[in-house]
Amino acid sequence: MGHEVLGVRTLFPMCQYIVTLVGMDDLNRIIVDCVLIDKRGVVEVAEEFNISRQWVRELVNRFEEGGYEALKPKSRKPTKSPTTTGQNIVDKICEIHKRLEKTGFDAGARTVRYHLVEEIGEKNAVSVSTIHRYLKKMV
């Protein structure tokens, strides 16, 4: 014998109030509030919202560690990329390219790579296609 608010079946008036108050945009907050304010079980809330109990537990843990701010969706963008070309190499590519243009020589990616290998060694030099990509960004 539950209530239905904005498409969500609720068993307790407090949860119904929360759904009405914030709308469906902040579902994570509603889920946490159902567990912590309404004192409902994780399994019950998971079944009601059709999500896993592990996800409900994860949301509650995030809330306990950082409050409502921690419930906002996290970026899936990687924090670092180990294969990114180092800034020192990019600077060296630009420097060689400008030097070659200034002296009137071909300043294409192959020529830049040749000079890059001469200056920093084969092991540290990047591919012609990588150099070409950075030269396109310069223009």
Image: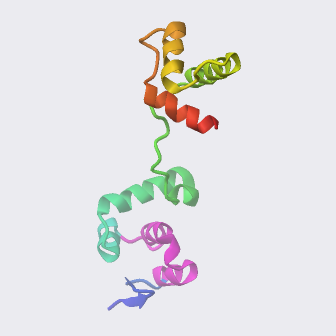
Residue 44 image-quadrant placement? bottom left
Q: Is residue 75 magenta?
A: no
Residue 87 image-quadrant placement? top right
Whether residue 85 is visible, yes or no, is no
Quarter occupied by the C terminus: top right
Q: Residue at x 58, y 25 (%)?
A: 90
Q: Residue at x 48, y 22 (%)?
A: 110
In the displayed structure, 13 sits above or below 49; it is below
Spot occupied by residue 42 in the image (x, y as percentages of width and height): 34, 66
Q: Which residues are magenta?
A: 14-40
Spot occupied by residue 21 in the image (x, y as percentages of width and height): 57, 81
Spot occupied by residue 36 in the image (x, y as percentages of width and height): 46, 66
Quarter occupied by the N terminus: bottom left
Q: Residue at x 51, y 26 (%)?
A: 109
Q: Could you say which is closer to the camera, residue 64 or residue 75?
A: 75
Whether residue 41 is visible, yes or no, is yes
Q: Main secondary structure of the magenta part?
A: helix
In the displayed structure, 48 sits above or below 111; it is below
- Name the side, left or right, on which 34 lies relative to 52: right
